Image: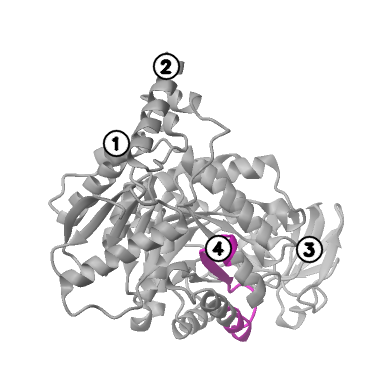
Amino acid sequence: MMGARIRRYSESMAGLSQSQDSFIQRQQLDAAMADTFLEHLCLLDIDQEPITARNTSIVCTIGPASRSVEKLQEMIKAGMNVARLNFSHGSHEYHAGSIESVRRAVESLSAEPLCYRPVAIALDTKGPEIRTGLVRGEEGGEVELVRGSRVRVVTQDSLRDSTDASQIWLDYKNITRVVQVGGRVYVDDGLISLRVLEIGPDFVETEVENGGVLCSRKGVNLPGVAVDLPAVSERDRQDLAFGVEQGVDVVFASFIRKAADVAAVREALGEGGRHIKIISKVENHEGVKRFDEILQASDGIMVARGDLGIEIPAEKVFLAQKMMIGRCNSAGKPVICATQMLESMIKKPRPTRAEGSDVANAVLDGADCIMLSGETAKGEYPVEAVSMMHSIAREAEAAVFHKQQFEELRRLTPMTSDPTEVTAIGAVEASFKSNAGAIIVLTTSGRSAQLLSRYRPRAPIIAVTRNERLARQAHLYRGIFPALVREPPSPVWSDDVDQRVNFGMEIGKVRGFFRRGDMVIVVTGWSPGSGHTNIMRAVSVP
C-alpha cells in the first residue's frame, strides 16, 4: 500500500513536470502528501535533495572571530541573515565598529540589485544579569577553578579587575542579602558551580563543586533566588540610546520576566526607536510562567536556553522550548531558538550528531530563526558553522509536515473579516495545491508578508518592498525573502505593480527558486499604500 502511494505521487508529479517543462518542488514530496503524521515519517527519504531556498533565518553573534569585513562577507554568503551584537561585552566604540563592518560587508555584495542580501542588526542588551569581572585585568584572561578549592565572591569596585583562582568579582552588590548558606552560585551557563559556605558583609565564601576554566565577564545565575535588579538598568538605557542612534533593527531584551519589563524597554527606546522590533528573551522560571503576557507585549520571543537551563531543571528545557515555539506559531509572532546549537564547532570543524539533531528539531518545532553564539563570536570555524546550520535547516524544512501544520493553524485562527488575512490563507492553500515555486507579495508595511509566513507555506515568500528597514526585519519571520526595490515608483501605479512583480520573478529565477513555466502565487493590493492587500493570482513564470 505504501509502495503504491510512493509510486503514485512521484510518477504523477514527474508527468506533470514534463508536460509543463517545469521542475515541481519534489523535495520529500511523497512524505508531504501523506495522510497521517506517522505515514509522513515513514516516507522521509535521505537520498532526496532539498530545494535551494532556506526558510529559517540564521542569527550570528559578531565577535573577535567574525567582525572583519572579509569574514562577514563570507558569513553572509554562507547564509547569515541577522548580525547580533552582545552588549554584555565590549564598548560602544567596539560595537560601532562592528556595525560599520556589517554594513560595509552588505554593501560590498550588493552591486547587483538581484543579488542584494539585506542583513538585520540586533542589539542584545545586558539586562538584569549578573557577570564576573576581568580575570587578572585582561579581557581575554582565563583561570582554572579546581574542585574542592575555596573561592571568595566579592563585590567591591576596587576588585573589579582582580578575579583569580582565590576570588571572583561580581557586579551584583546585593548577593550577600539574597543567597543563603548551602545555596548555589552557577557561572558560565552552569559549567562552574560554587556552594555557599559563609556570608560576610561584602563577600560570600564558597567551595568549588564543579570546576573548570573561568574567562572574563561570564554570566552568573542564582537559581531560586529573587534577584532585585531593574528590567532596564542605566547602562541598558545608554546602550539602547546608542542603538537608536546607530539605526539597529532589532533589540533582544535580556531576562524579561513580565509584560512591564517589555514596556520599560519600549519606553527606553523612545520615539526615535518606535520602529525597532523587541524580541523578549525568556530566561527564567518567572518568564516561563508569565509567558502569555510577555508574548502579547513583544514583537517576538527568544528561547534563551543557556540561562533557562540553569534557572529551571535541564530536563525541562525542551518542554519550555516546545511550549514557547508553539504559542508563538499560534499567535503569528517570530520565535528564535538559541544557545549551544553547534557549541562544539567553537573548537572543531564539524558538529556532534546530537547538535545536528538539535538544530533540525528546532526547525521542526517551528522556530523562525536559529542562533549561533560563541560559534561565530569567538570560534575557530565561524563560516563553517553558518554553512552547517544552513545545510541542516534546509534538510529539516523539507521534512516538515506542512499539510498538517497548515490545517492546524487555520483551525486555530478565529473567523476573520480582515481581507489581508483571508487573502494570505487563500494564497498559502493555493501554493500547496499547485506546488508553487514561490509566493510573491508586494508589501509596504510588511504585514502581508508576515501573515503569509504565519501560515507556513512550503514555498518561499518573496517580499518585494522599497522599505530598507522592513527588508532587514523580514528575516525574523520564517520563509520571507526580502527583495528590495531601489528604483523610484512608476508614475502609473498599475505599471509600478507589474514592475515590482517582475522584479520578484527575476529574484526567484536568479536564486534558483523556480524557472520558466513554473507556477507562482502573486499577492497584491487593489490600491496604493498599506492595508489594501486582497488580490491573489496564480501565474506561470514567463
User: Which comes sooner in the sequence, label 1 or label 4?
Assistant: 4
User: Which dot marks residue 497?
Assistant: none
The answer to the question of whether label 4 and label 3 lie on touching residues, with beta carbons closer than 8 A, is no
Mark 2, Cα crowd under 10 Å, few <14 / some 14-19 / many 20+, is few
Mark 3, Cα crowd under 10 Å, few <14 / some 14-19 / many 20+, is many
Write the start and end of the magenta stretch as one range: 76-98
User: Which comes sooner in the sequence, label 4 or label 3?
Assistant: 4
The answer to the question of whether label 2 and label 4 lie on touching residues, with beta carbons closer than 8 A, is no
User: Which comes sooner in the sequence, label 2 or label 1?
Assistant: 2
User: Which comes sooner in the sequence, label 1 or label 3?
Assistant: 3
Examine the structure image and report whether residue 194 is included in the region drawn in magenta: no
Residue type marked 2: Ala
Examine the structure image and report whether residue 92 is included in the region drawn in magenta: yes
Q: CA distance from mark 4 to mark 3?
A: 29 Å
User: Which dot marks residue 4?
Assistant: 2
- 353 vs 297, nearest the viewer: 353
Q: Is residue 508 visible?
A: yes
Q: Is residue 146 left or right of residue 363?
A: right
User: Which dot marks residue 214?
Assistant: 3
Return the residue at label 4. Answer: 80
Q: CA distance from mark 2 to mark 1?
A: 25 Å
Residue type marked 4: Met
